[in-house]
């Protein structure tokens, strides 16, 4: 299952775990012959106990496969808290709901910053299906004062009652299963997964699109890129964004949704030059393009089409209240005020400066990550988008 010599081999124990997941996927394939790629991606990431996000393997940080902004510096979460506070202070019963809480670092820093800002909240909800991640989050958050820790409530499903809240999701959209399309001069194809018995590995298998929604989407992409070159044009579509936002709209009576992820506007996303798509896998801090490398042991992601997010938000009853780069969002939300601590020694000051560079420089996280705000029954000029609002690009 190793695609090239640049990726390190997993331990025997990890390989056995992956093998167990592969057997589950192969059992599905024996019944159906092939499976659409979103189903493979869902099983690889979310199969209980075996999928990448559902197992006990380290994911974030030096021992894991990637680093996230909340782990780079608490400044990221503190800025996010300040933007959240601007909305929360307008709500009668302010709550925060976080998806994709990882190790709980962002929740910890946001709770501390809201407390420092004297912004009260009723509850801080964390939607978490993974028992392993929930345990890690509890361990992280238990370092908080009891009054703050007692605000945290874990959910394994969305709230049934209506809530006023700020909903936060950092790097959640990119981990949703995506459709893989291959557009050629004379046909549009959908990506499926099969198992090659001779090579003993999973492989791509493309077939003509028969689904009306996918056909409509592929036609829209062709309108943007024109006729594909002879090499073809491969890309991804996330059909989960609309139903996910609808599920949030169903319980959110008033408030805002703040989504942070790497991606582009549709015009940028579907450029003719981006013919290899945006599907990326992350394994031990190495990025590569093989989603079939030891399923369950690596992250599989795709960039976000933020135009699709905006359209889905509008369709589900939200107002698109802002869209900008992570760098401009952080600067608008108070980053510069946090960077100049006069009490910090030179070593700490240099450390903070490096963290800010990672969060804001164009060749780091600053430009590739975007922030979009969706609001419901909230009429505010959001601070995070005051420096540079890119809604006109959506």
Image: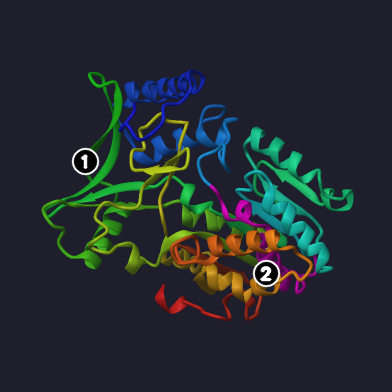
Q: Nearer the viewer, mark 1 or mark 2?
A: 2
Q: Residue at x 48, y 22 (%)?
A: 11
Of 5 and 144, the residue lying toward us: 5
Of 116 and 125, the residue lying toward us: 116
- Quarter of the image for residue 329 reads bottom right
- Say which residue label 1 marks: 207
- Quarter of the image for residue 358 reads bottom right
Q: Secondary structure at mark 2?
A: helix
Give the number of the disc on residue 361: none
Magenta extent: 67-93
Q: Position of residue 375 (x, y in %)?
A: 61, 70
Q: Report how far apart the C-alphas of labels 1 and 2 lie in the structure.
A: 53 Å
| Dot 1 crowding, Cα within 10 Å, few <14, some 14–19, many 20+ | few
Residue 315's place in the image compared with 281, above or below, is below
Q: Position of residue 51 (x, y in %)?
A: 51, 32
**Disc 1 and disc 2 in contact, CB within 8 angstroms:** no
Q: Position of residue 227 (x, y in %)?
A: 14, 62
Q: Is residue 71 visible?
A: yes
Q: Is residue 377 visible?
A: no
């Amino acid at each position: 299952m190793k695609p090239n010599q640049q990726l390190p081999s997993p331990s025997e124990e990890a390989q056995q775990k992956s093998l167990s997941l592969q057997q589950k996927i192969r059992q599905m394939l024996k019944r159906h012959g092939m499976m659409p790629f979103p189903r493979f991606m869902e099983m690889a990431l979310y199969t209980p106990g075996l999928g990448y996000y559902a197992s006990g393997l380290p994911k974030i940080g030096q021992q894991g496969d990637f680093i996230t902004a909340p782990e780079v510096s608490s400044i990221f979460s503190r800025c996010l808290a300040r933007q959240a506070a601007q909305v929360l202070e307008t709500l009668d019963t302010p709550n925060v709901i976080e998806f994709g809480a990882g190790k709980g670092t962002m929740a910890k820093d946001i709770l501390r910053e809201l407390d420092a800002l004297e912004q009260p909240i009723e509850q801080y909800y964390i939607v978490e299906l993974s028992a392993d991640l929930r345990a890690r989050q509890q361990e992280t958050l238990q370092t908080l004062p009891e009054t703050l820790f007692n605000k945290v409530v874990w959910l394994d499903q969305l709230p049934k009652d209506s809530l006023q809240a700020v909903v936060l999701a950092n790097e959640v959209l990119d981990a949703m299963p995506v459709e893989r399309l291959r557009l050629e001069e004379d046909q549009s194809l959908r990506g499926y997964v099969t198992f090659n018995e001779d090579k003993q590995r999973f492989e791509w298998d493309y077939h003509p699109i028969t689904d009306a929604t996918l056909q409509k989407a592929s036609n829209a992409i062709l309108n943007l890129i024109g006729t594909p070159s002879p090499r073809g044009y491969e890309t991804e579509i996330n059909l989960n964004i609309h139903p996910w936002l609808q599920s949030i709209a169903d319980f959110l009576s008033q408030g805002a949704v703040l989504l942070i992820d790497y991606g582009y506007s549709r015009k940028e996303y579907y450029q003719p030059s981006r013919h290899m798509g945006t599907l990326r896998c992350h394994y031990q801090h190495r990025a590569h393009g093989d989603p079939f490398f030891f399923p369950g042991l690596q992250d599989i992601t795709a960039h976000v089409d933020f135009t699709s997010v905006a359209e889905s938000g509008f369709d589900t009853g939200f107002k698109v209240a802002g869209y900008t780069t992570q760098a401009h969002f952080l600067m608008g939300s108070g980053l510069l005020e946090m960077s100049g601590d006069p009490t910090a020694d030179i070593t700490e000051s240099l450390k903070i400066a490096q963290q800010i560079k990672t969060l804001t420089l164009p060749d780091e996280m600053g430009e590739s990550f975007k922030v979009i705000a969706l609001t419901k029954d909230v009429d505010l000029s959001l601070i995070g988008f005051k420096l540079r609002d890119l809604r006109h690009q959506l």
